[in-house]
Image (cartoon, rainbow, N blue to C red):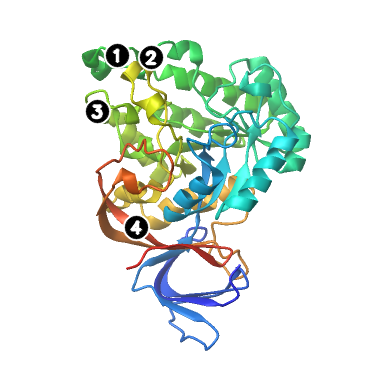
Amino acid sequence: MSDKPVILTNARLIDPASGRDEFGALRIANGVIDDVAWGAFPGGSADAEVVDCGGAVVAPGLVDMRAFVGEPGAEHRETFKTLSEAAAAGGVTTVATMPDTSPVVDDPALVDYVLRRARDTAIVRIHPTAALTKGLRGEEMTEFGLLGEAGAVAFTDGTHCVGNPRVMRRALLYARDSDALLINHCEDADLVGDGVMNEGEFATRLGMHGIPREAETIPLERDMRLVRLTRARYHAALISCADSVEIVTRARDAGLPVTCGISINHLTLNENDIGEYRTFFKLSPPLRHEDDRQAVIAALAAGAIDVIVSDHNPHDVETKRLPFAEAANGAVGIETMLSAALRLYHAEAIGLPALLRAMSTRPADILRLPGGRLEKGAAADVIVFDPEMPYVLDKAALRSRSKNTPFEDARLEGRVLRTYVGGTCVHRLDW
């Protein structure tokens, strides 16, 4: 925590919680937002550092609900230190990490390890999720109560779908009674089979086995019915097609406590980006047809999709520099999430307050964490970014240990100039 107050002046202040978007100034002191001056540019004081933002946006730090880290067990892919540095550079001040590590985070001692390791090495806030089933095997649920007391913010099997409906029903019942949040990756392994990309004409032309949309919609529809049966809090980790939006919307209209997320990749890329078998675009769920991409963008703008996540999944060359069918699923994305999302803003598909709400306020609310608000007394997790600043992404410059970005050499607009966590500046880009 910084001892010296900071005044961010001449800024475009955006509070996604209220939708307020005005020029003004913000004061940070003692690790919290000390004051928000909407429509005013107060002068500095002798004890404060004054930062002239030059009209740049000041907003709450982003909250990423879905990021994978190699530590423990695969530190060559990513550590809490490198993950946090990439997050800070991308304007992400809070990260929920997935339990897909070695060993799996399915024991209170491992939750405690993550929290202690992150406290000692990370520069942003790290909150672990714990495994929904032991060993991510989908057979026996974990001890939600003990894991929650240890600090787990939600329960998920990460990249694994809980396929057994009896196990899922029991987990939802237990989650309801303990007021826990369950997150499921909806992708039926049997329907995926040996599929490696979206089923359709393009997969046929490439000679690849396809994955039907039903691999996503069938387990999602099943989960909605189980939520109707149990009334537990449920979050669909990643949806990627119009049919899934319809399923979630119908459940929500029926009063069920369900939310859903989407990765930045499925909002900004489609199956054609795979091109000549580019493995950095091999994802789970797979990139969809452009019609589906346009449908999920419209759903995001309408509020039918709650959250945008990076789905940051670092892999090294040994698992990505392979024939497309053999390469691992996943891409890094925490550092580029905001820049990529701003493509939607520049295309006038969604307003900036609504876009930031899906990346800060809503995930904070769903995880029941502080954040996502520009208001007096809130934690000073704040970012300053220029939504118009252009750059070409050099993957070698990424802070992540892994470089499997689908945006390599892409022209992007929007750079994070400063990131504050608890009032301390953890990232600074000279401008």
- The answer to whether marks 1 and 2 mark residues whose Cβ atoms lie closer than 8 Å is yes
Q: Residues within 10 Å of mark 4 (few under 14, many from 20)?
A: many
- Of pointers 3 and 4, the one earlier in the residue sequence: 3
Q: Which of 371 and 246 is in front in this view?
A: 371
Three-letter residue code for mark 4: Arg
Image height of 121 relative to 406, above or below: below
- Of pointers 3 and 2, the one earlier in the residue sequence: 2
The residue wearing badge 3 is 272
- The answer to whether marks 3 and 2 mark residues whose Cβ atoms lie closer than 8 Å is no
Q: Residue at x 60, y 69 (%)?
A: 32
Examine the rendering and report whether any part of residue 37 can be seen: no
Give the percent coordinates (x, y) of residue 294.
31, 36
The residue wearing badge 1 is 208
Which disc is residue 415 wearing? 4
Q: Distance between the residues labelled 3 and 2?
A: 16 Å
Image height of 414 relative to 53, above or below: above
Q: Which of 395 and 281 is in front in this view?
A: 395
Examine the rendering and report whether any part of residue 281 can be seen: yes
The residue wearing badge 2 is 195
- Of pointers 1 and 2, the one earlier in the residue sequence: 2
